[in-house]
Image (cartoon, rainbow, N blue to C red):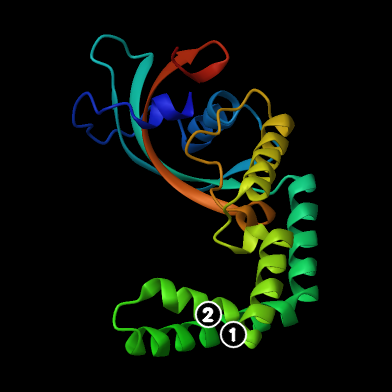
Amino acid sequence: MLKMIIGFPLAATLAACSSGPSNGDIKEEILKNVLRDCSLLSIGKFEKINGIPDARSDKVYQVQVAYSIDLDPAKENKNLVKKMSDYLSEIADMIDRRGVYLDKYHALNDKLEAESNGDHMGVLKKLEQDPEISTMKKEHEAFEKIYPQYYLYKGDEAQMLLWRMRANVRKTCPDTNFSGLMPEKIEDFGEGISKTFEANFTMRDTDNGWKIAR
Protein backbone atom coordinates (compact mmCIF):
# COMPACT_ATOMS: atom_id res chain seq x y z
CA MET A 1 0.00 0.00 0.00
CA LEU A 2 2.86 2.35 0.81
CA LYS A 3 4.43 1.89 -2.60
CA MET A 4 1.12 2.44 -4.35
CA ILE A 5 0.35 5.64 -2.43
CA ILE A 6 3.80 7.13 -2.87
CA GLY A 7 3.68 6.60 -6.60
CA PHE A 8 0.16 8.05 -7.00
CA PRO A 9 0.33 11.11 -9.30
CA LEU A 10 -1.23 14.46 -8.52
CA ALA A 11 -4.62 14.67 -10.14
CA ALA A 12 -4.55 18.44 -10.04
CA THR A 13 -2.80 21.32 -8.35
CA LEU A 14 -4.21 21.55 -4.86
CA ALA A 15 -5.23 24.87 -3.38
CA ALA A 16 -4.88 25.68 0.28
CA CYS A 17 -7.99 25.32 2.37
CA SER A 18 -8.61 25.84 6.07
CA SER A 19 -11.23 23.10 6.48
CA GLY A 20 -10.88 19.37 6.18
CA PRO A 21 -8.86 16.78 8.14
CA SER A 22 -6.29 17.96 10.65
CA ASN A 23 -2.64 16.90 10.62
CA GLY A 24 -3.47 14.55 13.46
CA ASP A 25 -6.27 12.95 11.43
CA ILE A 26 -3.96 12.36 8.48
CA LYS A 27 -1.08 11.04 10.57
CA GLU A 28 -3.36 8.65 12.43
CA GLU A 29 -4.65 7.26 9.13
CA ILE A 30 -1.12 6.83 7.76
CA LEU A 31 -0.12 4.96 10.90
CA LYS A 32 -3.13 2.65 10.67
CA ASN A 33 -3.53 2.14 6.93
CA VAL A 34 -0.04 2.62 5.51
CA LEU A 35 2.22 1.55 8.37
CA ARG A 36 -0.38 -0.87 9.76
CA ASP A 37 0.39 0.15 13.34
CA CYS A 38 3.83 -1.47 13.03
CA SER A 39 5.72 -1.17 16.32
CA LEU A 40 8.99 -0.56 14.43
CA LEU A 41 7.65 2.38 12.43
CA SER A 42 6.71 5.91 13.40
CA ILE A 43 6.13 9.21 11.64
CA GLY A 44 8.86 11.77 12.20
CA LYS A 45 8.64 15.05 10.33
CA PHE A 46 5.20 15.83 8.90
CA GLU A 47 3.93 18.64 6.70
CA LYS A 48 0.57 19.16 5.04
CA ILE A 49 1.67 20.79 1.81
CA ASN A 50 -1.70 21.47 0.29
CA GLY A 51 -5.35 20.45 0.29
CA ILE A 52 -8.67 21.10 -1.37
CA PRO A 53 -12.25 19.88 -0.82
CA ASP A 54 -13.66 17.68 -3.53
CA ALA A 55 -15.99 19.58 -5.88
CA ARG A 56 -18.54 16.75 -5.75
CA SER A 57 -18.84 16.35 -1.98
CA ASP A 58 -17.99 18.36 1.12
CA LYS A 59 -17.23 15.06 2.88
CA VAL A 60 -14.28 14.31 0.57
CA TYR A 61 -10.96 16.14 0.80
CA GLN A 62 -7.75 15.80 -1.22
CA VAL A 63 -4.48 16.33 0.65
CA GLN A 64 -0.84 16.42 -0.33
CA VAL A 65 1.61 15.70 2.49
CA ALA A 66 5.34 15.24 3.04
CA TYR A 67 6.49 13.09 5.93
CA SER A 68 9.35 10.93 7.16
CA ILE A 69 8.99 7.35 8.33
CA ASP A 70 11.39 6.27 11.08
CA LEU A 71 12.31 2.59 11.23
CA ASP A 72 13.61 1.28 14.54
CA PRO A 73 15.73 -1.91 14.51
CA ALA A 74 14.11 -5.22 15.35
CA LYS A 75 15.53 -6.58 18.61
CA GLU A 76 17.02 -9.64 16.90
CA ASN A 77 18.74 -7.49 14.28
CA LYS A 78 20.16 -5.11 16.85
CA ASN A 79 21.77 -8.07 18.62
CA LEU A 80 23.13 -9.48 15.36
CA VAL A 81 24.74 -6.20 14.37
CA LYS A 82 26.26 -5.80 17.85
CA LYS A 83 27.79 -9.26 17.59
CA MET A 84 29.26 -8.33 14.22
CA SER A 85 30.68 -5.11 15.64
CA ASP A 86 32.21 -6.95 18.60
CA TYR A 87 33.69 -9.57 16.30
CA LEU A 88 35.12 -6.88 14.03
CA SER A 89 36.94 -5.44 17.05
CA GLU A 90 38.33 -8.87 17.88
CA ILE A 91 39.85 -9.28 14.42
CA ALA A 92 41.09 -5.70 14.11
CA ASP A 93 44.73 -6.88 13.95
CA MET A 94 43.87 -9.21 11.09
CA ILE A 95 42.23 -6.33 9.22
CA ASP A 96 45.37 -4.22 9.68
CA ARG A 97 47.58 -7.06 8.39
CA ARG A 98 45.27 -7.41 5.40
CA GLY A 99 46.02 -3.78 4.51
CA VAL A 100 49.77 -4.44 4.81
CA TYR A 101 49.42 -7.51 2.61
CA LEU A 102 47.57 -5.63 -0.11
CA ASP A 103 50.11 -2.79 -0.08
CA LYS A 104 53.04 -5.19 -0.41
CA TYR A 105 51.28 -7.30 -3.01
CA HIS A 106 50.50 -4.34 -5.24
CA ALA A 107 53.98 -2.86 -4.81
CA LEU A 108 55.67 -6.13 -5.80
CA ASN A 109 53.20 -6.67 -8.62
CA ASP A 110 53.92 -3.20 -10.05
CA LYS A 111 57.68 -3.79 -9.80
CA LEU A 112 57.50 -7.17 -11.52
CA GLU A 113 55.17 -5.90 -14.22
CA ALA A 114 57.61 -3.09 -15.02
CA GLU A 115 60.40 -5.67 -15.45
CA SER A 116 58.34 -8.35 -17.20
CA ASN A 117 58.22 -7.12 -20.80
CA GLY A 118 54.56 -8.11 -20.88
CA ASP A 119 54.99 -11.57 -19.34
CA HIS A 120 51.92 -11.43 -17.08
CA MET A 121 51.92 -15.18 -16.36
CA GLY A 122 55.52 -14.91 -15.25
CA VAL A 123 54.58 -12.10 -12.90
CA LEU A 124 51.84 -14.19 -11.31
CA LYS A 125 54.23 -17.10 -10.88
CA LYS A 126 56.82 -14.91 -9.14
CA LEU A 127 54.15 -13.46 -6.88
CA GLU A 128 53.07 -16.94 -5.85
CA GLN A 129 56.68 -17.94 -5.17
CA ASP A 130 57.49 -14.91 -3.04
CA PRO A 131 57.67 -16.33 0.54
CA GLU A 132 56.38 -13.23 2.34
CA ILE A 133 53.51 -12.65 -0.08
CA SER A 134 52.60 -16.35 -0.04
CA THR A 135 52.39 -16.46 3.77
CA MET A 136 50.36 -13.26 4.00
CA LYS A 137 48.05 -14.41 1.21
CA LYS A 138 47.06 -17.50 3.20
CA GLU A 139 46.07 -15.34 6.16
CA HIS A 140 44.20 -12.98 3.82
CA GLU A 141 42.22 -15.89 2.37
CA ALA A 142 41.40 -17.19 5.86
CA PHE A 143 40.15 -13.74 6.82
CA GLU A 144 37.97 -13.60 3.72
CA LYS A 145 36.29 -16.88 4.69
CA ILE A 146 35.55 -16.01 8.31
CA TYR A 147 34.33 -12.48 7.70
CA PRO A 148 32.83 -12.17 4.19
CA GLN A 149 30.60 -9.27 5.25
CA TYR A 150 33.68 -7.06 5.42
CA TYR A 151 34.04 -7.33 1.66
CA LEU A 152 31.32 -4.90 0.63
CA TYR A 153 28.76 -7.24 2.21
CA LYS A 154 28.92 -9.75 -0.60
CA GLY A 155 29.06 -13.53 -0.59
CA ASP A 156 26.65 -16.27 0.42
CA GLU A 157 26.99 -15.75 4.19
CA ALA A 158 26.39 -12.02 3.96
CA GLN A 159 23.38 -12.53 1.68
CA MET A 160 21.91 -15.08 4.07
CA LEU A 161 22.37 -12.66 6.95
CA LEU A 162 20.57 -9.93 5.00
CA TRP A 163 17.67 -12.29 4.29
CA ARG A 164 17.53 -13.23 7.97
CA MET A 165 17.45 -9.57 9.03
CA ARG A 166 14.72 -8.69 6.52
CA ALA A 167 12.72 -11.67 7.71
CA ASN A 168 13.04 -10.45 11.32
CA VAL A 169 11.58 -7.08 10.32
CA ARG A 170 8.68 -8.64 8.40
CA LYS A 171 8.04 -11.13 11.22
CA THR A 172 7.62 -8.23 13.65
CA CYS A 173 5.08 -6.50 11.38
CA PRO A 174 3.69 -9.10 8.96
CA ASP A 175 0.89 -6.86 7.65
CA THR A 176 3.12 -3.92 6.73
CA ASN A 177 4.50 -3.28 3.25
CA PHE A 178 8.17 -2.33 3.72
CA SER A 179 8.74 -1.40 0.07
CA GLY A 180 11.04 1.62 0.00
CA LEU A 181 11.84 1.26 3.71
CA MET A 182 13.96 -1.87 4.07
CA PRO A 183 17.68 -1.13 4.70
CA GLU A 184 20.15 -2.23 2.04
CA LYS A 185 23.23 -2.79 4.24
CA ILE A 186 23.70 -5.16 7.13
CA GLU A 187 24.92 -2.49 9.55
CA ASP A 188 21.83 -0.32 8.91
CA PHE A 189 19.61 -3.00 10.45
CA GLY A 190 21.15 -2.26 13.84
CA GLU A 191 20.33 1.44 13.83
CA GLY A 192 17.24 3.57 13.38
CA ILE A 193 16.89 4.96 9.87
CA SER A 194 14.55 7.56 8.40
CA LYS A 195 13.22 8.01 4.88
CA THR A 196 11.12 10.85 3.47
CA PHE A 197 8.07 10.51 1.26
CA GLU A 198 5.59 12.78 -0.46
CA ALA A 199 2.11 11.44 -1.04
CA ASN A 200 -1.47 12.31 -1.96
CA PHE A 201 -4.48 11.01 -0.07
CA THR A 202 -8.21 11.18 -0.56
CA MET A 203 -9.80 11.63 2.86
CA ARG A 204 -13.47 10.98 3.59
CA ASP A 205 -15.43 12.42 6.50
CA THR A 206 -17.23 9.48 8.16
CA ASP A 207 -19.20 8.92 11.34
CA ASN A 208 -15.91 7.82 12.90
CA GLY A 209 -13.92 10.86 11.73
CA TRP A 210 -11.71 11.47 8.70
CA LYS A 211 -10.53 8.26 7.02
CA ILE A 212 -8.39 7.50 3.97
CA ALA A 213 -10.80 6.63 1.18
CA ARG A 214 -10.46 3.14 -0.23
Residue for point 22% across, 23% down: 11
Residue beneath label 1, please? 130
Mark 2: amino acid: Leu
Q: Nearer the viewer, residue 174 or 30?
A: 174
> Is any part of residue 211 visible from this angle?
yes
| Mark 1 residue crowding within 10 angstroms, few (<14) / some (14–19) / many (20+) | few
**Which residue is farthest left?**
13
Decide: is 118 above or below 144. below
Residue for point 72% across, 78% down: 94
| Mark 2 residue crowding within 10 angstroms, few (<14) / some (14–19) / many (20+) | some
Q: Quadrant of residue 37?
A: top right
Q: How many marks?
A: 2
Q: Quadrant of residue 172?
A: top right
Residue for point 50% across, 19% down: 211
* Mark 1, secondary structure of its residue: loop
From the viewer's perspective, tell me whether residue 107 is left or right of residue 143. left
Where's residue 124, x and y in %? 47, 74
Q: Quadrant of the C terminus?
A: top left
Where's residue 195, x and y in %? 48, 48
> Is any part of residue 192 visible from this angle?
no
Residue for point 67% across, 32% down: 170
Mark 1: amino acid: Asp
Q: Quadrant of residue 116?
A: bottom left
Mark 1 and mark 2 residues within 8 Å of each other at the beta carbon: yes
Decide: is 56 above or below 113. above
From the viewer's perspective, tell me whether residue 20 is left or right of residue 56. right
Where's residue 151, x and y in %? 58, 62
Where's residue 4, x and y in %? 40, 24
Residue beneath label 2, please? 127
* Mark 2, secondary structure of its residue: helix
